[in-house]
Amino acid sequence: MTYCVGLKLERGLVFMSDTRTNAGVDNISVFKKMFMWEREGERSVTLMTAGNLATTQAVVSLLNERAKPAEERGHPSILDAPSMFQIAKLVGETLREVIAEQSGISGPQADSPFSATMILGGQVRGGEPRLFLIYPEGNFVEAAPDTPFFQVGETKYGKPILVRAYNPDMSFEEAVKLLLVSFDSTIKANLSVGLPLDLHLYPADTFQTGILRRIERDDPFYEMISSGWGEALRAAFYKLPDYSLD
């Protein structure tokens, strides 16, 4: 299992992913789940992956292979597609292709053991920053004011804080704090999600990779958020009125 979140803000896009991959309690590893492509001054693209590791690695490898100079490839490239919509279409088609090849079936199925789901975001010059959720079947939906963030993987534990506290005009600093609370809640509830966490902050209209950070287990700010959030929840709970049995 994994946990990845993409947020769309007025000032840009925020991406965070965990790095834990497991095949049972005795086989836990760290694998990167956030990948980026850029043509500085023209586009910046970020992809986060959840699902079968072999599938997601194959998709990223194909996208990298097809991002080579035009004379070295025979497929459309994530660096040449004219819009984020076309990039989402390309990633969806690549995901569908890989699942079909690995599963040996004519069309991908959401419950396939080779299934994967992805969050894609970024900006191509001439368009606005855009965020997409890509399904195993290769189709996708786009973030909108009513659905301003996407989650993939183990989503249920971290969603309540996002729903309650998200604000489109929040700062990047506030967004990172919000996501750390969401991830901390998930990590405490599910052993299949774990640190380190990868973070990418993309400011709108910069057309290049933004701020990149890896948040380790001993990160002092993460430790402060983790302990402070627990204390704040307990304090808020005891301030609520008790239920009356009369």
Image (spheres, helix red, strand yellow):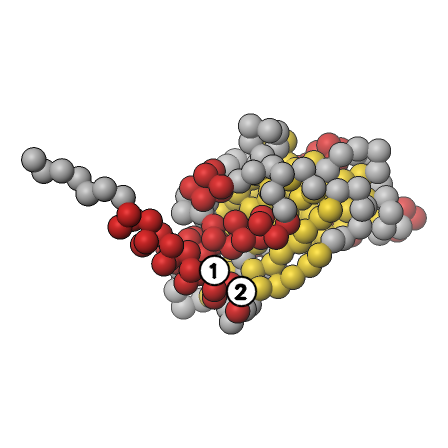
Give the answer, above or below, for where 39 lies relative to 167: below
Which disc number belongs to residue 221?
Answer: 2
Image check: 178 left or right of 89? left
Quadrant of residue 83 in the image? top right
Task: Check whether the beta carbons of the residues at disc 1 and disc 2 lie within 8 A of each other.
Answer: yes
What residue appears at the point 58 percent right and 34 percent down from the top-left corner? 148
Give the answer, above or below, for where 105 lies relative to 199: above
Mark 1 is on which residue type? Ile
Residue on which disc 1 sits: 225
Give the answer, above or below, for where 47 lies relative to 87: below
What residue appears at the point 73 percent right and 32 percent down from the top-left corner? 85
Secondary structure beneath dot 2 equals helix
- Residue placed furthest toward the right: 71
Mark 2 is on which residue type? Phe
Image spot of residue 157 (x, y percent): 40, 47
What residue appears at the point 51 percent right and 63 percent down from the top-left corner? 222
